Image: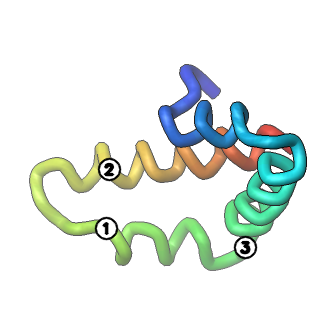
Amino acid sequence: MGVPTFIASEVAAATDGLAAYLAMRFGETVRHPHFENTLPGLVVYDELYADRVRRVRESIASIAALA
């Protein structure tokens, strides 16, 4: 998965209950059948678009992997 993102590191450092809850919910988000198609529409389209989408996906996957 690569280097954890800042937000994933923050979640990992949270209390066990909060980290587990967030990991569970982000896992649900990643597994949602429309997630991959919906996310790009929520990100501002400019020259950094592809990088932003990639970083959001990595952050969400990193948090989900904490479960």
Q: Are marks 1 and 3 in contact (CB under 8 Å)?
A: no
Above-or-below relation of 40 to 58: below
Q: In which image quadrant can residue 49 be found?
A: bottom left
* Left or right of 18 in this view: 10: left
- Measuring from the top left, give residue 24's x and y in whole percent: 84, 59
**Amino acid at pointer 2:** Arg
Task: Tell me which label, 1 or 3, sits earlier in the chain.
Answer: 3
Q: Which mark is residue 52?
A: 2
The residue depicted at 46 percent of the width and 69 percent of the height is 39
Disc number placed over residue 5 in the picture, else none: none
Q: Answer above or below: position of 57 versus 42.
A: above
Q: Where in the figure is residue 65, as x and y percent of width and height?
A: 78, 40
Alpha carbon of mark 2 to alpha carbon of mark 1: how far? 7 Å
Whole-number angstrom distance, CA of label 1 to CA of label 3? 18 Å
Q: Residue at x 72, y 73 (%)?
A: 32
Dot 3 alpha-carbon crowd within 10 angstroms: few under 14, some 14 to 19, many 20 or more: few
Q: Which mark is residue 32?
A: 3
Identity of the amino acid at label 1?
Val
Question: What residue is drawn where x is 32% and y is 50%?
Answer: 52
Q: Which of 35 and 28 is in front in this view?
A: 28
Q: Which of marks 3 and 2 is nearer the N terminus?
A: 3
Residue denoted by label 1: 43
Task: Give the residue type at disc 3.
Answer: His
